[in-house]
Amino acid sequence: MKQEESYFVISLDFELFWGMFDKVTIPEYGERIQGEQTAIPRMLALFSEYGIHATWATVGMLMARNKDELLSLLPPRELQPTYEDMGVSSYRYIETMPIGRSEQDDTYHFGSTLVQKILATPHQEIGNHTFSHYYCIDGHKNSDEVFSADIDAFNRIAETYGVHATSIVFPRNQTSPEALHVCHEKGIRAYRGNENHFLYEARKDSSQSLFIRAFRLLDHYTNISGHHTYTIEKRGDGILNIPASRFLRPWSKTLSFLEPLRMRRIKNAMTHGAKHGEVFHLWWHPHNFGIDQEENFNNLTEILKHYKTLEEKYGMQSTSMSDLTKK
Ligand SMILES: [Zn+2]
């Protein structure tokens, strides 16, 4: 990668309800998951219009076409992860909660049509968000074989779509050196690390303090922790860390008067990256756009328009995570 080149990376954590079931219920959050049915095609159309190359880090379980296929992919019980709090385990969830037969009757857990739509759109990459929404830090007592079995299960379902994922986003951004080693052995060449600031370090999910959360929130509106743009030095054929620069928070009615500040903070960081030959990496979940779609899409359009001006002025390029490993 040449020093003067700047890149705009977008990654999405595509998980339907598999990334949320331990936090919220379907009555509480289901509308946002349903909203993905319209939000994802709309995002894809916008990405095509603005020439965006994005990475869709996808949970393997949602790629199953029906419940039989899902069950056939599960690793044997001794290779399924255990956690201190088994309430976060998708395997436990499958056993205890009603999952539908297929997308026909359950779009909270099955998303093969959406996967096909992503694959049918130019310059979109399907990345790995683990098979089971696996937690590397919460599940640090699991052996490498257990994590390996998860990646193998992801690769098995991905292959049925003709996909071999070479990038990964770790659920809740929980990374470990052991997990990275396994990923590298499985042919993964890039991952999304945390923002380079102590506010954004990977932590056990239960130890995220109120103090940290409050500062992170404030940091979305005003520049507390810096622009989070960076240069990437490639090192041999190792696994490339492409840290997140910013989470694109969903539009908030309560804080809507602050939205211009939030947009300005993102655009300033993009401009900084473009001017200095650096990477700016924006990420979100499609379900963040599940409701308040007009407001969320207005914000996204504003960001993509800004990218276009930076492309013209400074030659900033839109790249997926795997694209970036080839620069
Ligand atoms: Zn996730």
Image (cartoon, rainbow, N blue to C red):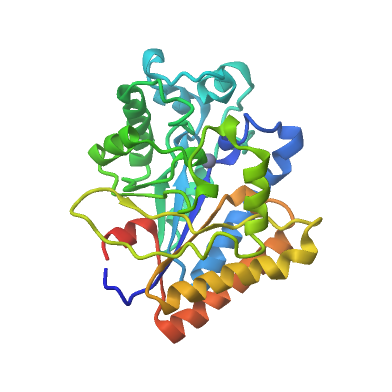
* Picture quadrant of residue 225: bottom right
Q: In which quarter of the image is the C terminus?
A: bottom left
Residue 5 x, y percent position in the rendering: 34, 75
View extreme (bottom): residue = 313
Quarter where residue 102 is shown: top right
Q: Residue furthest top?
A: 78
- The answer to whether residue 43 is left or right of residue 61 is right
Where 309 falls versus 227 (above or below)? below
Q: Position of residue 157 (x, y in %)?
A: 38, 36
Where residue 267 appears, as percent x and y from the top left, is 57, 72
Identify the residue at horizontal 42%, vertical 19% (top origin): 80
In x, y percent, where is residue 280? Answer: 46, 65
User: Which quarter of the picture shows residue 149?
Assistant: top left
Please tell me which residue is depicted at 64% across the width and 51% down the height of the picture.
215
Q: Can you say whether 142 is above or below 134 in the image?
A: above
Could you tell me which quadrant the N terminus lies in? Answer: bottom left
Q: Which residue is drawn at 51% across and 36% down?
A: 203
